[in-house]
Amino acid sequence: MNLKRRMGACLPVIVGALLGLSACITPQAPPTGASGHEAVQELSLAGTWRYQKGGLGPENLADPALSHAHWPQMTLPANWYLRGVDHAGVMWFRKTVPLTLPEGALARLHFSGVDYACDVWVNGTWVGHHQGYFAPFAFPVTAQLQAGDNLIAVRVNSPNEEYGRQWSLHKRLIKGVLNHHDTRPGGAWSPRGQEKNSGGIWAPVTLRITRKAAITGLAVTPELTEDGAEAHVALALATPDMAGETVQVTLRVTPQKGDGTPAQAVTTQAEFPCLGETLSGHLTLQVPGARLWWPWELGTPALYRVEATVRQGDTVLDTHADLFGFREIKRDPATGTWLINGKRIFLRGTNYIASQWLSEMDRTRLAADLDLMKQAHINAIRVHAHVEPKDFYRLCDEMGLLVWQDFPLQWGYADDKDFSDEAVRQAKEMVDSLYNHPGIFTWCGHNEPPWDATWMKWKYPGYVPGQNQELDRVVMQALVKADASRPAQENSPTADHPWLGWYSGNWRDYARPTDRSLITEFGAQALPKQSTLETFLPPEAIWPQTREAWDLWAYHNFQEKESFEIAGIPRGESIDELIRATQGYQARLTQLAVESYRRQRFAPVAGIFQFMFVEGWPSMNWGIVDYLRHPKPGYMALQQAYQPLLPSIEMAKETWAEGETVTARLWVINDLPEEIPEATLTLALMKGDRQLAKARETFAIEADNARQATGISRAGLPQGAYHIEAAILGPDGKVLASNRLEFRVEKGETP
């Protein structure tokens, strides 16, 4: 959706059929028409529905003559698993809606999210089909509605794929991590890896009633100018039975969040002829002195409200509003550096899967997760191979958090044209539905596709090296065509996922230089606290003593080989010892990896994304926050290492031999746009509370910079536990940032 072609301020341009952006339409306060009646009515269909499991046979449970009084009840919206129904396949839902449709009204039935495919009937008449779990969609239903009771019937199909033939190398469902991943029930490589199906009408359903016409799309492309900004607005309308008539459109752009300085609303109007069943047009609004949307550490995430009102004379036909932000995103293709509004930013990111069942996450729960992220100094979130609920993106916009948005392709998929055509269609749906969110800074087509992930030859006997290469090419084309305002990338490659100390190598290998500009996965597993384990493991499996118990741990994502053989984590003699060992390992690896990559800031590293922020179901995986949202020590390690202003401590190893000279170097890393003109750096070697050596240096810390500073060394340390303390003090002596690194001295040679 490239609207950057200059079209002339405030002049409408009639174009061909625009995107069917029903995804953009959300409930809002209805306006009042000239007659005093509401011009727009939003009728929520949330609440009690009747449901019935079904097969794939010819039965039609949408017939109004069929009684559903004996069917069980389910409160929607919800993934059916969260309502106690563990089912894969077809589920029928029915609801009776009393309604009187005003004369001349236009009615559309809106679904904000159905997993995975659905067919919809109104009063026994089929009105449409949709496929794909994440995208909103709508069907016109004016002709099917009647005065009195109206029967809405929905057949949802969320099947499991055939094990071995389709799942998991040749999948056909575009569900990403929701049906194949190593953090979901059963894990990635077990025949049980599709259990606890995510199907359902998981997001709101509304009946939207307007007058004669309905706004079906409202997309805003911001463009920064020398004296402010321009908002290029693409508007789409449904105009059945209005051929030959005209409508007037008013656009109003109003600042919603800023720095408190006054700002005026900007309004423009245009008249459009109705040429057929749909109408599409472009308008441009100039906004002098526009406030920019910034990531939280670079400025204020200023938001604007755009409201479109469609009238015919004095009568309001429809109105719709959305939020957007003025910002510009660029990426230097040579260095991989990201620029927001012309300022470069180092991405301190994390990977995120909020839940395996998206209806579990309301705005309050999502906000709590994002608050934890900001407290850990995270500025970018990779939505890992899926799409989150709408509230997530709005919260990120409001909180100044950048979003890397993956398309839900995870590992291997079918390699035929029917599948690639469907992937292209859904990729366009994803962009259309999320287009106005300023926090989204990039689209990514596929996570670890088979043609890139050569490790798959050890997983799959039928592995073909070129699989999904053409799929990725056409999905990338679709992303670029749908949105020219943001950079896109074809995939997140295996080379950007080092996994040192987990799938290969040693965790100390993170201290070595990298040649990658982006690191989009790194981390290690750690057990949650025992009280969390006790919520989903039986008592006999808390401290595994049998193969059956270890298999249950594997079902909950614990990786035994990687933990004990590659990472070398000691099993210990109790669950308490094992918890402390895994959590300590995750924390040490996280601190080392983050600080090492940040010391390579823009030489060549432009951004890093820790894997994974939370555990999205009762699990024991890579999350630094467990399923119940209890932070692990790994969270504190990330929080310390992600400080925008960081005194980073570099040591060659964490275990030294008696007689060796222990050395540490201090780096000063400043991701902030402000210089600190007179800062003091302190470095101390400590044994408990006793200071054994210290160093101090005073100089100006440049903005957006990293440099090596003072160091410290000490010979002849006896065996024992030690730590290094580092701090940056401001001109007034106040501690601006601090850090700590633990090490040991042991007898004999050390690695």
Image (cartoon, helix red, strand yellow):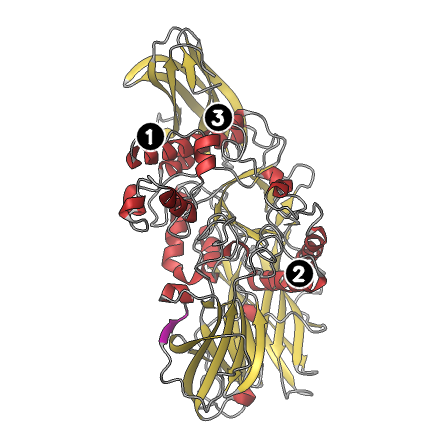
Disc sitting over residue 572 in the figure? 1
Would you say residue 75 sits in the magenta stretch? yes
Q: Is residue 362 visible?
A: no
Left or right of 512, for residue 539: left
The number of numbered badges drawn on the structure is: 3
Could you tell me which residue is drawn at 35 percent across and 28 percent down?
734
Separation of marks 2 and 1 at Cα, in angstroms: 54 Å
Q: Earlier in the sequence, mark 2 or mark 3?
A: 2
**Hey, what amino acid is under mark 2?**
Ala
Q: Which residues are magenta?
A: 73-77
Mark 3: give few (<14), some (14-19) or many (20+) Cα within 10 Å. many
For the residue labelled by badge 1, is the local secondary structure a helix, a strand or a loop? Answer: loop
User: Which quadrant of the figure has residue 230?
Assistant: bottom right
Front residue of 114 and 372: 114
Front residue of 573 and 485: 573
Q: Position of residue 669 (x, y in %)?
A: 49, 29
Instruction: Read off the residue under disc 3.
Output: 668
For the residue labelled by badge 3, is the local secondary structure a helix, a strand or a loop? Answer: strand
Instruction: Read off the residue under disc 2.
Output: 482
Could you tell me which residue is drawn at 58 percent across and 37 percent down?
606
Front residue of 663 and 410: 410
Front residue of 390 and 471: 471
| Of labels 3 and 1, the one closer to you | 1
User: Which quadrant: the N terminus?
Assistant: bottom right
Separation of marks 2 and 3 at Cα, in angstroms: 41 Å
Mark 2: give few (<14), some (14-19) or many (20+) Cα within 10 Å. many
Would you say residue 445 sits in the magenta stretch? no
**Hey, what amino acid is under mark 1?**
Gly
Q: Earlier in the sequence, mark 2 or mark 1?
A: 2
Separation of marks 3 and 1 at Cα, in angstroms: 38 Å
